[in-house]
Image: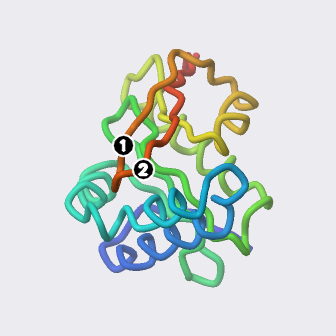
Amino acid sequence: MYLSRDYQETDYSSLELIYHDAVMGQGRRGYSDQQVSVWASYPYLYPEDFSRLVRHGYTRVMTLHHIPVAFATLNPDHHLALLYVLADHAGRGLAGRLCDELEQEARRRGVSRLGTDASVLSRPVFEQRGFRLVSQQEAIRGGQAFTRFLMEKALD
């Protein structure tokens, strides 16, 4: 049974691996090999950024038999910054459960609108959850251009 809990410092290296595995396992559905390689390496190419998001945000971890398999982060309180699931556990509703928990926490923190920067792959998932497109941007990481969709959802 999958259980969720707050982030613990001992989870950190597992979250780096979850991020990498999720991108490597699913990224080629919408990105080139070069883009996937750069995207999957984010925790290692930009360790300060990844660390700040995870350690200084509100991070929830989904576990199976006490082993992390997915995670999501609010950072800052009004922004869903990270949402990743190990490829072998994708499609089991874990991302949706984590989103529900982060939306609930954002409401508890007084947030009325939750934003996210969605990828080509995650945009449909967020649209199904009631997020709407605000704008589209190009981000450059590791010499690769990535389209991202700035989206938001009103929290009632």
Residue 68: image quadrant is bottom right
Residue 74: image quadrant is top left
Quarter of the picture holding the N terminus? bottom right
Residue sitting nearer the eye, 95 or 3: 95
Quarter of the picture holding the C terminus? top right
| Amino acid at the residue labelled 1 | Ile
Q: Is residue 2 left or right of residue 22?
A: right
Which residue: 69% across, 57% down? Answer: 94
Residue sitting nearer the eye, 22 or 153: 22
Secondary structure of the residue carrying tag 1 is strand
Q: Is residue 100 above or below residue 27?
A: above
Q: Residue 140, which numbered label?
A: 1
Tell me where residue 136 appears, x and y as whole percent.
51, 23
Q: Residue 144, which numbered label?
A: 2
Tell me where residue 8 appears, x and y as whole percent.
35, 71
Tell me where residue 59 appears, x and y as whole percent.
41, 55
Q: Is residue 89 above or below residue 153?
A: below
Q: Is residue 55 above or below residue 69?
A: above
Q: Residue 118, which numbered label?
A: none
Which residue: 44% across, 43% down? Answer: 145
| Mark 2 → mark 1, Cα distance in angstroms | 5 Å
